[in-house]
Amino acid sequence: MEKQFNGRVLKDKDPCIIHGALSVCAMIISKKVNSLNKSSYRYHYLCAFDFLSLKSKENEQGNFTVTYIKEISVNNRRPVLAGMAVLLITCVLVLGSELKGAEKRPPNFVFILADDLGWKDLGCFGSSYYETPHLDQLAKEGMKFSDAYSAAPLCSATRASILSGWAPARQHIHGVTPESKEKSHNFHNYKSWKDEAQHSLPKVYPLTIPKQLGQFPLERITFAERLKEKGYATSFIGKWHLGPDHGQLPDKQGFDHTFAISHKGFPPTYHAPYRKGKYKLEGVKPLTKQEYLTDRLTLEANSFIEKNQKKPFCVYLSHYAVHGPWESKDEYKEYFEGKRKPGAPHDNPVYAGMIKSLDDSVGKLVAKIKALGLDENTVFIFFSDNGAKTEAKQRGGGDKFKVTSMRPLRGEKGLLWEGGIRVPCIFRWKGSIKENQVSNTPINSTDFYPTMLSIAGLSVKKNNPVDGEDLLPILKGGTIGRSQLTWFMPHYMKAGDGLNSSAAIRSGDYKLVKYFEGGGVLHNLKHDIGERDDLSSKKPSLFKKLDEALMVELKSQNAHFPIANKNFRSKDSDSPNTPKIWDSPKKTSTTQTGGKTSTTQTGGKTSENSKFLAAYLKNNPTADADKDGILTGKELKKHKASIKGKE
């Protein structure tokens, strides 16, 4: 019986059969296939078996069963079998080696960071006005964290925590970094996290504000630098906002590729050509006149992915959206104006349009990964750097307007209430994370660093005191052993109803907010997510226990605690809710509940200095008066004389 192959008649014992088998193997060896996935190899198996006049069938387990076609003549069977043996032996060796190599290739990462996106600002987190179908689908195909937190209620501190895994207290970046070196006088260049604190002494606040780093230091080890140990190609696209030094931008922090980097906390505008006044987004040349910034950043991310698809890659897409200036595409604004219900919690059509563009970005990224056949080997992470602003003004003036609502949470960006730190978070890893999972385990932005390292097959270095936890056990359906989360915010914040210099701890369902001026509040988040019912007087032992645990952890991180401010002048006080404990000649006690302050006077006279010292030591029993720089005796008189002289 004659057989033909590419027009040639194959006769009995024709060596072309063996040659053909070897050529198929050579094609596999030379990797003339689309990618190292099982579907590509199945295709070549089928081609080879068909060439050798074999019938192949794939069973449910993905294995092949082979039936020899009886039409092959007896005389022809021996060379066919020889060719098949060569083919199968070679394919087994090559395929086994390649699949083993493919397994060793660590997963890719696509980390999408939103800016100032509130906890309820996605459809999958409860919004009925904002439309986020792609993010909703991402959550359906992975795991949504209901109790995810930023390490701080402000962006620079959170961004530093993501890059390094260090808590803001240890980093000494607990607020925002300066836009320029000229504005860095309230910052200090600490050489080590163990350095002693330096303080700013604004006369409007009773406590000092510990100076923080003005620049994320090159000495800090980023997750990008660690991933490069595994051969990752790394990209940082978008908002940096970790210091004004152009010699310490992400290209010096482990990222091979960067685009649209800005040391400011916002873009000049979201519309091409990305210039307003003297501020221009450097290195971004618009491709069209109608270009929108969120779209362009996504285009750059997808371009990087396509160029580096043959190796493990990590794209850190740090969107400027949905931070101000609040600007949407015209068509999106018009669409959301049409479905707006005035007075509803979410009813800002411009903000809604910005969120829709952010969601479009996620959809385009997922589509690119799928098109390249990388879906099962790519981890998607979506997160926001802090809570949203609820009211704002456009830069340059104008009336205050509503941005969004944080209901049912209390507070907003800048505050340690839930509205400032609880944020949306989604993980998706096709085939490795089960679909439709929701975790209520409290997690923190410091956790991304050890988690990404763990997924990539790396471990945290012993000499690098990472504060986060590896979340991989949770992603796989298990648990982690952490018992608490802490926050450190030694600033006076005026957002919303305001909050004085403070810190916080969450353990289980309970959360304590500690005021550094004294006192604090305790809430059960399970029953009071809006943080309105203060339980501190009902559960004093729990209050004390959490307060002590908070201070132990902050001290272990060498937190720079605020101290009594010797420059404070109460008549100039500018704190949101500051007890006026140094105004009256009578003894004064002050308590704070939530955002309100109540003051009672018990009579009796005392000197201004002794009141100052007594109040401070009462609220800070472990303080060292001399070391903390509290004025005593002649120092106070000299200081008061100097103030009077300036007046």
Image (cartoon, rainbow, N blue to C red):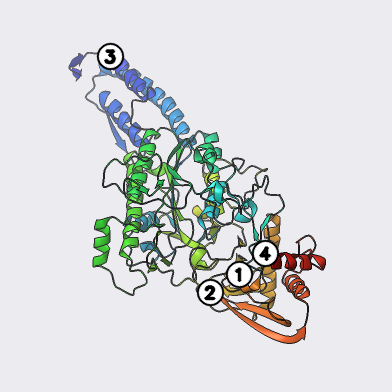
Which amino acid, by three-letter code, is at mark 2? Glu
**Apparent side of residue 647 relative to residue 23 in the rendered image (left or right):** right
Residue at figure coordinates x 64%, y 70% from the top left: 515
The alpha-carbon separation of the residues under discs 4 and 1 comes to 38 Å
- Tell me how many marks there are: 4
Q: Earlier in the sequence, mark 2 or mark 3?
A: 3
Which amino acid, by three-letter code, is at mark 4? Lys
| Residue 591, image x, y percentages | 65, 79
The alpha-carbon separation of the residues under discs 4 and 3 comes to 102 Å
Residue at the spot of label 3: 16
Q: Are marks 2 and 1 in contact (CB under 8 Å)?
A: yes
- Which picture quadrant has residue 331? bottom left
| Residue 98, image x, y percentages | 43, 29
The alpha-carbon separation of the residues under discs 2 and 1 comes to 10 Å
Q: Earlier in the sequence, mark 4 or mark 1?
A: 1
| Label 3: element kind | helix
Q: Earlier in the sequence, mark 2 or mark 4?
A: 2
Which amino acid, by three-letter code, is at mark 1? Val
Q: Are marks 2 and 3 in contact (CB under 8 Å)?
A: no
**Disc assigned to residue 531:** 2
| Residue 481, image x, y percentages | 61, 58
Residue at the spot of label 4: 646
Q: Are marks 3 and 1 in contact (CB under 8 Å)?
A: no
Question: Quick one: quadrant of the C terminus?
Answer: bottom right
